[in-house]
Amino acid sequence: KGFTLIELLVVIAIIAILVALLLPAVQQAREAARRSACKNNLKQFGLGLHNYHDTHNYWPPLRGGTSGGSQNEQLSGLAMMLPFLDQAPLWERISKHAGGDQGGDPTVATFPHPPGEIEVFLCPSSTVPVRHTSGSAQKSYAFSVGDTIDNNYTSINPSTGQIMRHRGPFGYRLCTRMRDFKDGTSNTIAICERDLGNPGDLRDVIGHVSTTATTVPSACVATALNGFYTSGSQVDRPAQYWAFGAPYYNSVAICVPPNGPSCGTPLGSAMISVSSRHPGGAHVVFADGSVRFINESINTVNLNHPQGRTGGLNEDAVANNLGGQSPYGIWGALGTMQGQEVVGEY
């Protein structure tokens, strides 16, 4: 005797319910595996930093290593870490000195050996978009410059007084040593996730907005609505060049909470936030090599405070003082390496 129509519909309904119950569990298991792989990538970065320090007695700079001229000393610290991330052959190709000024902005120039996308540079949870038209390879991780980024692109020129202000372990031609971590290596963030996925999502792009929004975290947060920037805001994707050392493309500031918006322009100040495709937060590597997951709800205290300054918008006291305490609570304290803050539970 065969199934009646009603019995068949009941069986189909039961199967549909089981699938509906199992599918989220399967998706969660897949994300857990991707999150674990992403964490392992960052563990390799932590180990690579310490091996680099053992070899050179300092960490790689955020930017430097090429001659001046139109290249503007913009080789990324990620490129310098290649030999310590099992990528020595690629580093050998990049490091061969061509001699003289080769001409062209690093973002659009034709390289003799175009950098390729490297597995350890990409978080499996990121949705990799179409490669940028210049052919430059993308990445999911960036260096921490602390709780402020001033003069973040080609405007940096120490000979004319234009400097990059930072309070974290990475900066323009800055070679940090282990002895520089007055707050302790376990309390200072070194490398963070910076997602490269959907060009429309505020986690993945920088909004070109007003000057105030690039210097005051709360003003930057106000530019976003329902996960996207308000209409009319031009956006840029900062994760598209791992070999290009400009802070705008290879750094994050520890002020806006993880997965918050980023605001700035390539030629001035910027507020580039930590971001990921993981629900609820993002991974960071601390200076001791440990990897931790930071929740979006981490304490930030005063996002109305101008970025990296003790007083008004035009005061640079904290930006020029590595020892000043961060106004951004526990999150900001984890970004500074000499702030002398007391870090509580997070």
Image: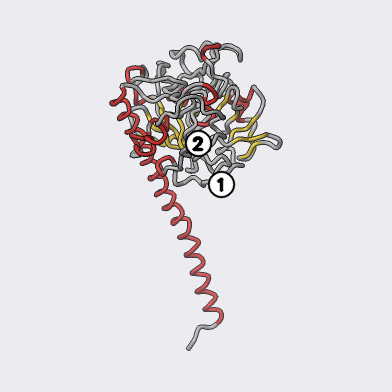
| Mark carried by residue 130 | 1
Q: Amino acid at mark 1?
A: Val
Secondary structure under the numbered disc 2 in the rendered image: loop
Query: Which residue ends up furthest to the bottom in the rendered image?
Result: 1
State the image quarter where residue 248 is shown: top right
| Front residue of this view, candidates 78 and 229 | 78
Q: Residue furthest front?
A: 99
Secondary structure under tag 1 reads loop
Give the side of residue 332 with respect to residue 39, left or right: right
> In the rendered structure, which disc, 2 or 1, sits on the residue that comes first in sequence?
2
The percent coordinates of residue 249 (x first, y second) are 52, 31
Residue 154 in the image, given as x and y percentages of width and height: 56, 23
Tell me which residue sits at (60%, 29%) in the image: 263
Instruction: Give residue 192's position: percent from left, percent from top.
Output: 44, 33
Residue at screen point 50% across, 21% down? 68
Label 2, on which residue? Answer: 111
Nearest the eye: 250 or 168: 250
In percent of the image, x 42 and y 48: which residue is there? Answer: 34
The disc labelled 2 sits on which kind of residue?
Phe
Residue 329 visible at all: no
